[in-house]
Amino acid sequence: MKVYSRRVVLCVVAVSMLLLLSEISFAQQQPLRSITYRLSMPRPVSHLFEVSIEIELPPGLENQAFEFQMPRWSPGRYAVFDFAKNVQEFSAAAGICPAGSFCDMAMRPVTRIDDQTWSVAPLGSSSLTITYKVFANDLSGTFSQLDSRHANYNGGCIFMYVVGHKPDSVKLTINPPPGWKIVNGRIERPGQKEWLFANWDIMIDTPTEIAPDWSKDDFQVDGKRYHVVVHSMGDEGGKRANLVRDIEKIVRAETALWGSPEFEEYTFLIHFAADDHSGDGMEHLTSTQIIEPGALADQGVYDDTLGTVAHEFFHVWNVKRLRPLELGPWDFTRPANTRGLWVAEGITNYYGHLMLRRAGLWDDARFLRRESFTIASIENAPGSRLMSAEESSLSAPFLDGARHAQKTNLANTSISYYPKGELIGMVLDLLLRGRTSGKASLDDVMRQMYDEFYLKSPSASYYLRGKGYRTEDFQRVASQVAGFGVDDFFKLHVRGVETLPYDEAFGYVGLRLARTRSPDPFTGISLDFEVQRTATIDNVRNDSPAEDAGLQQGDEIIELAGKPLARDNWSSTLGRYKPGDSVPITVKRDRRTIRTNLVLGQPARFEYKIEERPDATAEQKALRVAWLKGS
Ligand SMILES: [Zn+2]
Ligand SMILES: [Zn+2]
């Protein structure tokens, strides 16, 4: 760090303030005369989308360079993916050719100025046409896919924005292959191929499916229209009608909590990919993309889909409209850093499960089993004593779907804000209900937040109604609704890593958390379940018997106690030994065979079960009914 004289610092501040003001006034006062995106897909088997961006410049800007930028990441998934890596054949021409005609346009110089940005000089032209192609062959809520079956895109990895002009309104025209139909969450008329969006951010919030053979089922709740669009790559087993009926039950349960949603229409875009690897769910303002790796007919896929629907639809309010300060509009040159993902995602996880109960799709026992499972996943994780819910939120770029070229210790040092936020939400809900004898709940906190920050706040940006909240705001509103301070709770359990007060929370509703030590001796080894046959070590706990034995991630265990080992007989072989036993173990690492001894530790894993208290009172049972059924 350098030390500057006070005078110099003041000058620097003054100059940067001026620059900032001039940039802001430029962005707000000088929108381009028009920005039009055209998307075509003339050769689906190539996986190449073709994009053109036509811009008309205001007078006087014909000699200023314009920058076109591909986002590093896109909203809802916080890992950095650098979408620019799939851009090819970027070029620029002077003028705009009328749609459907051919024009011989003069080219304009293009300078690649960094990994995500292309700069174009109009050289006196009052309009420009930019063209490029994007390779896309991933079916997901973040990436896009074009192949012989369909085009499914998420705009963040397809459409560059014009730097400084994200707030401008944009037009989009899609030119589909013959016989392919377009559907998204902003269809206003049958056969629609053109859209006008208030800004670029709204355009990329509109994932779109283009294919010859998707199906659409509709229902209405409280005058709002819902569409269930399904593209099945496998057998549906006759389950689609029931699926639509159960999605309607979820919509009814969630709108009962929040009140009527702001939109008139909402679209569930669902893929049954039948490829055994594509799976995702992504929230948007008037739609959601849901991708299941199986076929609808497969065992378990139906239930998984409903679980994702319950989660994603809750995001209509929590995260899409009621949002942390940093989540919209976004800076796509760097990862999003927010402390609030434990609210945005974790509390959504909690309600996703609770809403399945309130919709009548789960019974009490199934909901409590699911929460017991979440408690076990957090309480047995070494990272839960090292990383708080807020730190986990800030670490999202490393945790949320990130792929690491460098080896990490994250399995030992991190927790996910999804399950941690889910448990914070549940325990806070029960403390509010219990300490106020049922007068307040987390439902009230969420509604109050939505009212204050979305419905009643003046718009803080071009992007969307309302303004973002800070986690301190959530803390304040929770205290107001509760009628008692929750500052200590936040200090210990949101910013700190103290174990949540499960006993107090469950006690209010006549339940308790039973904790039993699992009999298995402790090794510190987790196996890689992505690897089908061999017993390959995915993670070694710090300060564990495995670490003492010198084992490490990536080692392939070939023998335990002299017997050949595969993934399937790891547990049964280990089960023959007890804590303190020294078991010979042989692993393959690179080209070496390593023999060592694993000295088994005392059992360290606990099982958790939320169960009925024998002394539960009528009042406690009534509070439980209000919690699980909603009131
Ligand atoms: Zn599709
Ligand atoms: Zn989510």
Image (cartoon, grey):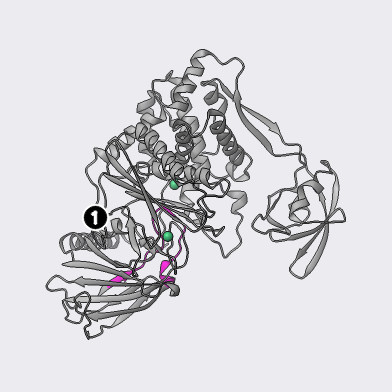
Say which residue appears at 33% left-offset and 36% top-offset: 449
On-image quarter of the N terminus: bottom left
Give whichever of 626, 443 is nearer the camera: 626
Ligand 1 found in image quarter? bottom left
On-image quarter of the C terminus: top left
Q: How many marks?
A: 1
| 228 horizontally vs 272: left or right | left
Magenta stretch containing residue 76, yes or no? yes
Binning the other alpha carbons within 10 Å of mark 1 as few (below 14), some (14 to 19) or many (20 upward) gives few
Q: Quadrant of residue 358?
A: top left
Residue 164 visible in the displayed image: no
- Residue 513 position in % (x across, y down): 61, 27
Give whichever of 54, 397 is nearer the camera: 54
- State the SS at label 1: loop
Answer above or below: position of 18 versus 113.
Answer: above
Answer above or below: position of 389 versus 560.
Answer: above
Magenta stretch containing residue 215, yes or no? no
Tag 1 residue = 189
- Residue 29 position in % (x across, y down): 15, 61
Give whichever of 56, 180 is nearer the camera: 180
Say which residue appears at 31% left-offset and 33% top-offset: 259
Outermost residue toward the left? 59
- Residue 362 position in % (x across, y down): 51, 33
Q: Which residues are magenta?
A: 67-86
Answer above or below: position of 608 versus 390.
Answer: above
Residue 210 visible in the displayed image: yes
Say which residue appears at 77% left-offset and 39% top-offset: 602
Say which residue appears at 43% left-offset and 31% top-offset: 487
- Residue 183 position in % (x across, y down): 33, 57
Q: What type is the residue that disc 1 sits on? A: Arg
Main SS class of the magenta portion in the image: loop
